Amino acid sequence: MGYGNPVNTRGTFEDIINLLNIQHLNLHSFLYLMFIASSDEAVMENPAQISEFYHAIDVNKDDRLSRDEMSGITIEQWKDLCRKSDSPHGPTKSEMGDNAEKTNASAAFNPRNNDYYSDAETTKRLVQFIMEEHGYNGVLPYHKFKELIELKSEDHPNSAFIILDTNMDGLLKPDEINKLKLLPFRQVARMGPIYVGDNAEALEEFESIPGFAGKVVTQAMIDIEHEMELKHPVMEVLKQLAEEIKSEPNGWSVEVFTKRMKMVYDQPDAKYVDYPFLFSLLDRDNTGMVTVENMEWLVYSEEANTPLRQIAPKEGDEPVVIKERYQPATARRTLVNLVDTMVSVNQKMKYIKYKLALAKKKKDKMAHGKKEGGKMAQGKMDADAKRDEL
């Protein structure tokens, strides 16, 4: 069955604290980050394991993780957490059916849907598409390649081109690309290629080729994602508050911020949002006050919308599979994800408390019934004894 990849879990966790400049975490906020980092609701099935891990890494035992304590978590500790917090059961019946469908759909994915294959094949299809649509009789010179490809890793397009241009003549030719194994395409995939050409409709048709399960990222898709993030209910509210706070030069305390959020955030799940933690995410300077600069940075700045370069595995790590996020994390996207996570986690915690209360009530009722039954039995015995005496 295996367990979660500790390198991925640690990488996502570190990305979040770096993007939002998180300096401290309590147990509850740590649970939010773990919910995202593990990408598995099993973390909610094993809250005791998460709590045990949290208290183990809380070196000075002040019930609060500092940035140094977060950064000091070893890969062995991450491995131990992934083992302990993994779901105690194997695949469900429905999950096994889904896996069987994927396996039968394509022999190339036998015996499992492989991320290595999918990412590399997607990149290969993207390169072939660009050569066919924008090349000269299928031949693509470097100057056309760099106009059509941007890299999320912030590398220059030349870094990707030289991996594919095996004979180093400045041209990508069909026979050259067709002979390449998947490894070079995997290397380019890790750079996060984005198609910025103007023929997205033809690309969509190209992606529909039978047996091709990948999805090429285009600039239009990224623009839509950014627009959707800004339209997220919490971002709409933060834009409104960014205007209101302009009249408060010293900013808002956590109490004022929480009060204002509760007044304007009218979503059905608003009661599950952890407003003090949201405040700490906005207070990037750790001054204890949220200012107009803090609000405007998150809502409007280009920096808040800039991907963080993926954190490479630390020296000595030996992950079995390195799986990168296909869409890179940004501060704005991460905050929106955390708000959604707060809702999911706190709803789940409420349900768990409800079930525990029901179980306790049932247990107490059974204990009370046994006690009453014991009293009745004892009363009958006493009555029988008295009758015998008479």
Image (cartoon, rainbow, N blue to C red):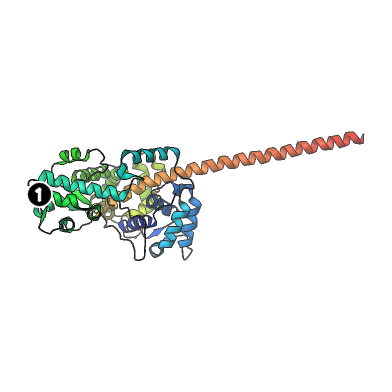
Residue at the spot x=17%, y=55% of the render? 164
The quadrant of the image that shows the C terminus is top right
- Foreground residue, 262 or 71? 71
Residue 211 lies in quadrant: top left
Q: Is residue 330 something that shows in the picture?
A: yes
Q: Name the residue under label 1.
A: 139
Going by the numbered disc 1, the residue's amino acid type is Val
Outermost residue, right side: 390
Element carrying mark 1: loop
Q: In this view, does 259 lie to the left or right of 142?
A: right
Q: Is residue 244 something that shows in the picture?
A: no
The image position of residue 334, as x and y in percent, is: 32, 50
Residue 206 lies in quadrant: top left
- Foreground residue, 107 or 93? 107
The image position of residue 362, as x and y in percent, is: 61, 39
Q: How crowded is mark 1: few (under 14 residues within 10 Å), some or many (20 or more)?
A: some
- Foreground residue, 67 or 132? 132
The image position of residue 30, as x and y in percent, is: 42, 54
Residue at the spot x=37%, y=44% of the render? 262
The image position of residue 76, as x and y in percent, is: 43, 62
Q: In this view, does 73 lie to the left or right of 328?
A: right
